Amino acid sequence: MSVLEGKELRIVGFLCNWCSYGGADTAGVGRFTQPTDLRIVRVPCSGRINPLFVMKALIGGADGVLVSGCHPRDCHYAEGNYYARRRLEVLKGLLPVLGIDPRRFEYTWVSASEGQRWQHVVSSFTAQIHALGPAARFTEAPEPARLGA
Amino acid sequence: MSEQTGATAARPVYKAGTRNPYLPMPAKVIEVITETPTIKTFRVVLEDEQLMRDFTFEPGQVGQLSMFGVGESTFVINSPPTRKEYLQFSVMRAGENTTALHSLQAGDTVGVRAPLGNCFPYEKMKGKDIVFIGGGIGMAPLRTLLLFMLDNRKDYGKIRLLYGARSPQDMAFSSELPDWFGRRDLECTLTIDREAEGWQHKVGLIPNVLLEMNPDPNNCVAVTCGPPIMIKFTLQALEKLKFAPEQIYTTLEKRMKCGIGICGRCNIGDKYVCIDGPVFSMAELNAMPNEL
Amino acid sequence: MSAENVKKFISFDALPGFLARAAEKNAVYVPRREGNAVVYRSFKAGDEAELGVRPTESCKHVVFPRGEELFSFAREADKEEPGKRRLVLTEASEPGAAVVFGALSCDARGFLAFDPVYNGSGTGGTAKDSYYLRRRNRTLIVVKACKNALNTCFCNWVGGGPASPQGADVLAVEAEQGLVLDILSGEGTAFTESLPAASEAQLAAAAAAVKAAEDSLPKAADVSAAPASLAALFSSAEFWNKESAHCLYCGACTYLCPTCYCFNITDESDGLTGVRLRSWDNCMSPLFTLEASGHNPRPNKADRLKNRVGHKFSYYPSLHSGRFSCCGCGRCIKSCPSSVDIRKIVLDAVKEAANV
Amino acid sequence: MSIQDELKSAITAALPDVSCVVGWGAGPEPLRAAPLFIRGEADLEGFSAGFLSVNNPALYLPSLKGSKVGVVVKGCDARSVGQLAAETLIKREEVHVIGYPCRGVIDVDKVAAKLAGACETGEVAALREDGDDVLLNTPKGEVRLAKKDITADKCGRCAFPNAGNADVFVGERCAPVVTEDGYADIADFEARGLDELKAFWEQEMSRCIRCYACRNACPLCVCRDQCVAMSREPHWLSQGDGVRDKLFFQIIHAVHLSGRCTGCGECERACPLGIPVLKLKRALSRRVEKLFGYKAGGGDTPPLLTFLVEEPTIKERDWK
């Protein structure tokens, strides 16, 4: 058995204030069991999520990043999630070329009443990240060990 | 590599134990005075008692205040060298570090690197009349020289202060003003830009009030500091009053990092404001490239 | 000729072993080819030093690291007063000894521009840069003389040459499938102790190589009027706008330059701990002089290019006995993405000032 | 009339109406031209457009906003003009675009590779074009190189050699090298696998000196004076020398260019340390093209500045 088994990984969640944060709260109030790896950052809207938030987390050592906002047509600010959807969908193209497993990043929509859906999303994403294991971290050193050395 | 056998220039010698000029001295904030909505004054004491006892500086010299984790910025030590219970710095909130400094409370620790730079030529000013012209936060460097001169009153002739701010609320050092007004050996004039209720002093821009004051340039030195626009018109006024460039002193501000003439950003031509300044006479400034 | 002035020889075959032995004791930096660039890398056994193609960057970072911790700070829990935190400052640890093997002559001369400034010339020696001085004292520089000049080389304009010994501990000249080593300091003597003396033939070949290299440089332009010319043109916005029109004000020139010594100081913190960092800074960036009030004494790229050229060819010489803070390596020209040529600017300035 | 002469006449004709025309002139060495600001006919003497016209003159346009200027462009430069105009970073009517058919530009690094062992590019004393070849005077004698072997990679996938949006076009339009950019280079690169790519970027970025030539050479990096890379609030990057921060800057650059990058390659060309930073931008361009059928530079609204309520090409995960 791996020493990492059962160990928490670092998963960062960016959740919009109006829907998904409420959904997570609903799941909590409903006492739905969920894994505890996720650290939630509440943002006003998924449209507020700069793709660089995701990248900063991944480069800074997160093992996974999950974004969740209001369902399309339900954005509190009418259109924020539409822009988010395009930006985040495009961002997925950057991960493999950097050597980051694209499965470490997902985005979805969870409304404030969907406690159960939230539980399902968190559980399946966490399982996915655990299956991938901890992410290799980019070095902070000025000169890495050379390729092949 | 001290021993050179060839034609190469020797390296500068490094002696172990050379003082680290970048290491700030920890200092305790003993008092915070809210001067205006954007200016706070901090009185600090070096934590090392011996260092505090031995600390000397000249009026007009500056120090770097550190907020660890944020950065360092340069401020004049505006308490006079004649009063050594604490070092006083007045800070206008403008950027990242000054904003952080404004969060300081009595008992907090800051870093101090001081003294840095040159000072007002107070020896050369002896026996002369002095006119101080300060605008806004520009009063801070004048305060140190003013108090120094008041503490050595017999060395100087007539001393006059013209201090202006946008409004009464923007006037720093207001708690000291009654004392300054009460002195017979100091002539104090205050002005604000626009009429305000209850204001009993002058109303008008500093250069205009200065012309009205009409100081006699004969055997007189003008010392001025303030925002660039005020300095510009004050210099024109002083010129009208027949002050020669050699009779006018000001103190400059530049973005600084090292404070010891190395990091290379505060230069005006071949002069570094951090070591050749911050105090310059107008005559010196006139000889320098125009890059303020 | 005294004993320590005997020139030594090392064959290219013996060089990797020699460097590997040196690397056991010191950090040894050698130029290495990586992609389209040649950069100084710490030498590991089995590496090949690139002593032919001239390095893209200078070796100044060995003595003046791109990012150097000045000290670290921490807010530690106060044992006596629970809930209180005590500030602890810790000075950066002492650097170890280093060797640069295969620096260019202009790289070594670059440090001579740093030296007086970092030795506290500005403060009359009262504030010396201890970080620089200690690394400088612990870094031995082996210069590999150039065999010929590049189009962008102008070391002879500013007092240098392809085989100038200035700033070097050892001067290596390629000859007879190896390097003839001229030992120029006590440390250089110790470093080359294990090596045999060069033969007469090797010495003759080396002398011929130096002569050929020197001959390959075009005649130096006279830039003695540059300090006065640049000062005279300070207020000529038209001149500087023209010279800087195509400059894209990145930092390639300053960061590749062996003599550019300006730096920034920033705090980089993470919660209760952090470091005060000294990092390379660049006078071509508008942030270099931007004040917190929003005022900037050098708002345009023309102002900044003027300062860069002025510093090297006017301000610095006026403070340091006429010495230019330019070593003529030409990297700022060679690597400039928009082909700015400092030689042209200086010559244009001299010409323009003569016409004024 | 030769293309050069035609271009010169076009510039001369434009000069009365513009403050300057940006083109190319002699550079510091035979292999390199320099951007040339033509303010009067006297400046025209050094003008030349062709194999050495590497720099993208569109770079300068946002800083010249407010007065009418002229610019001589290759096909790829014209895409930058188009993108700047589409984003209202320049006013199209303030720019007089002079186009000509471009048959590719030199990649000095490729010349260096060809000359490796013989001499450095800095030793080339003269360059002469001879049809499809160039002749180089080197210390080792004359070297003949085929242009196709020393042409920039971007030219090998050029679909727009003729400035499409030119106000004046001189010469005969030439056929595009390809009709579609297949992004085969990016596919091949990605095929190396995640571990190798991570190590690749660590190694490459360790050469970075943080000079920001990549940013300042990018015609679409218009906020360079207020770049987040230098911002303290928020503090995205430390000023340290670590690989991670350096790579993160490249991520910032790429992300800020997603749906905007025209692939002019100036970022990579400007890098003095030869770090292949264009790859990250191309990876995003490929994705943008696949999702939204959008090629930056054509003048349409950038895809990230708009949306559809139903996105037919986005296949969201269903979390079933």
Image: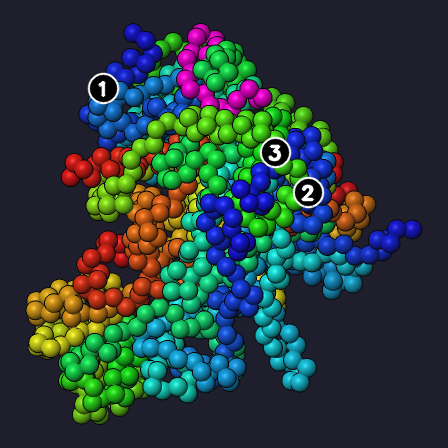
> Considering depth in this image, is B45 or B263 the residue closer to the camera?
B263
Q: Percent x, y for residue D67?
A: 26, 35
In the depicted structure, whether residue B191 falls above or below residue C101: below
Mark 3 residue type: Ala
Examine the rendering and report whether any part of residue C139 can be seen: no
- Type of the residue with mark 2: Ser
Mark 1: which secondary structure? helix
Magenta residues span D116-135
Which residue is drawn at the image coordinates 69% and 58% (left, top)? Answer: A39
The C terminus of chain D - image quarter? top right
Q: What residue appears at the point 61 percent right and 54 percent down from the top-left corner?
A: A16
**B70 or A21: which is nearer to us?**
B70
To which residue does mark 3 refer? C198
The tag on residue C194 is 2
The answer to which image quadrant residue D42 occupies is top left
Q: Is residue C165 left or right of residue C201?
A: left
Say if the magenta span includes residue D121: yes
Q: Quadrant of the N terminus of chain D?
A: top left
Foreground pick, B263 / D221: B263
In the picture as drawn, the residue positioned furthest to the front comes out as: C1
Residue at position x 58%, y 56% from top? A43
Vertically, is B274 above or below D119?
Answer: below
Q: Is-magenta flag for residue B19?
A: no
> Of helix, strand and loop, which one carries label 3?
loop
Look at discs 3 and 2 and give the one toward the viewer: 3
Is A75 on the left-hand or right-hand side of B21?
right
Q: Amino acid at mark 1?
A: Ala
